[in-house]
Image (spheres, rainbow, N blue to C red):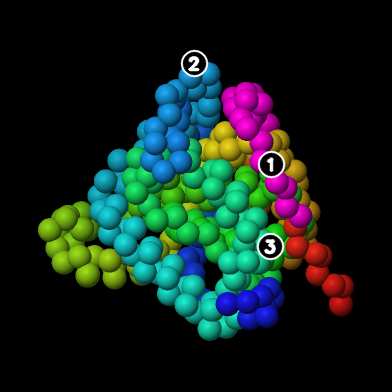
């Protein structure tokens, strides 16, 4: 596929796209909550090679233990469903000329940033060492990005172009979305739904000893509809900031990123801000945690190549 087959503003119809994405949450009217905290102490090398943790590894954000609700749902089935859903999404996008080719400059950029972030993922979730990571760019003016369970990442062209993101800001978004996958927020939300609906016994049969195909189909339907909570979003902000800092990207970009998001939200807010505006509280939380991750950034090898954002859209 060549660039001529890609339309950045195709605004493709993608029925398999998840409801969640960058900045989205299901938190209308909820009060801010401070998550339980846990010190991050590990470090993973690329390709599953575990690096020895130096003394400064006791730095880092605290986000608490993984939720017990996630254990009600099979990780294998969640990841299998996400893989199927992601593959269908890419096929749909390609048919509509909305899937950027491998040689697109922004695809090259996204994959270069991902290659720096992914080596640190296994310390947050050992399963990530076996994930088949994918990074793609979708032709859409929507301001969004996501990482599905199992490491399936997609950015929408609109968020890169409209916000004119620096590499550091892209890394903050990617780290945030990867954090959702590493902390298994989708799996946790499904587990909570099962418990709330009184479906634990059915779930045990379906996700434990039941038919794999039926389980994957059931989970795929839930992946299409679920959204993340305010606590999930706050946790992803902090974990993502640490991932980006360890990868050599300036964590202070989280502040400028959300300032840009706040500007975009004026007037008619985009969909990803409609339920979770990027306000001063979120920026303050990032600023408060910067001292925990700035040492990682200062010591990390920095990218040898920097990329420019797409040209701004022509004014109509």
The reply, left or right, for residue 33 in relation to residue 256 is left
Task: Looking at the picture, tell me which residue is in the foreground, 125 or 271.
Answer: 125
**Quick one: label 1, few (<14), some, or many (20+) residues within 10 Å?**
few
Q: Where is residue 251 in the image (x, y as percent from the top left)?
A: 66, 36
The mark that comes first in sequence, 3 or 1, is 3
Q: Where is residue 64 in the image (x, y as percent from the top left)?
A: 42, 31
The reply, left or right, for residue 138 in relation to residue 190 is right
Q: Which residue is drawn at 54% across and 48% down?
A: 115
Task: Choose top left, top right, bottom left or bottom right for residue 253.
Answer: top right
Asked whether the beta carbons under mark 1 and mark 2 sit within 8 Å of each other, the answer is no
Mark 1 sits on what residue?
Answer: 304
Instruction: Please say whether residue 289 is one of the residues in the magenta stretch.
Output: yes
Q: Which of marks 3 and 2 is in front?
A: 3
Q: Position of residue 304 (x, y in %)?
A: 69, 41
Q: How many labels does the image show?
A: 3
The reply, left or right, for residue 275 in relation to residue 231 is right
**Furthest residue to the top?**
55
Q: What element carries label 2?
A: helix
Segment tinted magenta in the rendering: 287-308
Task: Choose top left, top right, bottom left or bottom right for residue 107.
Answer: bottom right
Q: Which residue is drawn at 33% across and 65% down?
A: 81
Q: Residue at x 66, y 26 (%)?
A: 298
Tag of residue 55: 2
Q: In this view, does 158 lie above or below 169?
A: below
Tag of residue 72: none
Q: In this view, does 161 lie above or below 240?
A: below
Real-space Cα separation, disc 1 to disc 2, in angstroms = 26 Å
Q: Residue at x 58, y 77 (%)?
A: 1
**Furthest residue to the right?**
315
Mark 3 sits on what residue?
Answer: 105
Real-space Cα separation, disc 3 to disc 1, in angstroms = 16 Å
């Amino acid at each position: 596929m060549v660039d001529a087959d890609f339309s950045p503003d195709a605004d493709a119809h993608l029925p398999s796209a998840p409801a969640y994405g960058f900045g989205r949450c299901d938190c209308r009217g909820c009060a801010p909550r401070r998550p339980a905290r846990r010190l991050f102490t590990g470090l993973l090398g690329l390709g599953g090679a575990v690096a020895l943790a130096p003394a400064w590894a006791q730095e880092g954000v605290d986000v608490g233990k993984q939720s017990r609700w996630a254990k009600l749902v099979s990780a294998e089935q969640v990841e299998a469903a996400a893989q199927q859903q992601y593959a269908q999404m890419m096929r749909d996008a390609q048919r509509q000329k909305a899937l950027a080719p491998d040689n697109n400059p922004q695809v090259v950029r996204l994959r270069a940033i991902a290659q720096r972030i992914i080596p640190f993922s296994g310390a947050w979730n050992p399963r990530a060492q076996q994930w088949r990571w994918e990074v793609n760019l979708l032709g859409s003016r929507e301001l969004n990005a996501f990482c599905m369970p199992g490491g399936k990442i997609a950015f929408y062209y609109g968020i890169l172009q409209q916000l004119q993101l620096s590499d550091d800001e892209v890394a903050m978004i990617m780290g945030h979305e990867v954090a959702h996958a590493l902390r298994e927020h989708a799996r946790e939300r499904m587990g909570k739904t099962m418990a709330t609906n009184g479906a634990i016994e059915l779930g045990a049969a379906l996700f434990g000893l039941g038919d794999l195909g039926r389980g994957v189909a059931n989970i795929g339907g839930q992946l299409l509809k679920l959204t993340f909570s305010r606590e999930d979003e706050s946790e992803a902000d902090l974990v993502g900031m640490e991932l980006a800092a360890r990868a050599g990207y300036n964590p202070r970009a989280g502040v400028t990123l959300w300032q840009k998001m706040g500007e975009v939200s004026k007037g008619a807010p985009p969909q990803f801000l409609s339920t979770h505006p990027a306000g001063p509280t979120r920026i303050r939380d990032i600023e408060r945690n910067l001292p925990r991750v700035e040492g990682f950034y200062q010591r990390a090898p920095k990218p040898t190549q920097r990329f420019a954002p797409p040209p701004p859209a022509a004014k109509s």
